[in-house]
C-alpha cells in the first residue's frame, strides 16, 4: 500500500505569530495603532494571553514595526507604528 498526501494535508497553517504580525502591519500602515488585546482577540483568533506573549516577542524581533507597552489600565494598551 502506498500513502498519499492530499494538498490540504501538506499545507501548514499560518503561525500565530505570523497571523498577529500581518494584522499589526495592516492596521499600522496608515499610522499609529493603539489597542488592548481583548479588543483584537477575535480578529486574530488568539487569546489575550497569547497576544500579550507574542507582543513582547514581536517588540524585540519585528524590525518593520515599533511596538511598545503604552499604558496599563485594567489591561495593557499597546502602541504599534510602522518603523
Image (cartoon, helix red, strand yellow):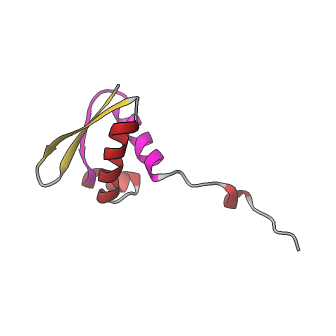
In magenta segment, residue 36: yes
Q: What residue do we see at 42% from left, 41% from top?
A: 21
Q: What residue do we see at 11% from left, 50% from top?
A: 73
- First to last magenta residue range: 16-37
Q: In which quadrant of the rendered image does the C terminus lie?
A: top left
> Residue 81 lies in what quarter of the image?
top left
The extreme left residue here reads 73
In this rendering, the count of numbered labels is: 0
> Residue 45 lies in what quarter of the image?
bottom left
Q: What residue do we see at 40% from left, 37% from top?
A: 61
Q: In this view, does 81 lie above or below 72?
A: above
Q: In which quadrant of the rendered image does the N terminus lie?
A: bottom right
Residue 72 coordinates in the image, percent (x, y): 13, 47
> Residue 82 lies in what quarter of the image?
top left
In magenta segment, residue 63: no
Left or right position of 17 against 67: right
Left or right position of 43 against 76: right
Q: Is the magenta stretch mostly helix, strand or loop?
A: helix
Amino acid at each position: 500500500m502506498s500513502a498519499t498526501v492530499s494538498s490540504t494535508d501538506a499545507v501548514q497553517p499560518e503561525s500565530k505569530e505570523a497571523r498577529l504580525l500581518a494584522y499589526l502591519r495592516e492596521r499600522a500602515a496608515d499610522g499609529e495603532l493603539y489597542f488592548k488585546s481583548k479588543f483584537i482577540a477575535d480578529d486574530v483568533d488568539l487569546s489575550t494571553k497569547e497576544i500579550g506573549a507574542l507582543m513582547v516577542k514581536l517588540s524585540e524581533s519585528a524590525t518593520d514595526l515599533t511596538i511598545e507597552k503604552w499604558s496599563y489600565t485594567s489591561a495593557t494598551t499597546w502602541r504599534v507604528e510602522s518603523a
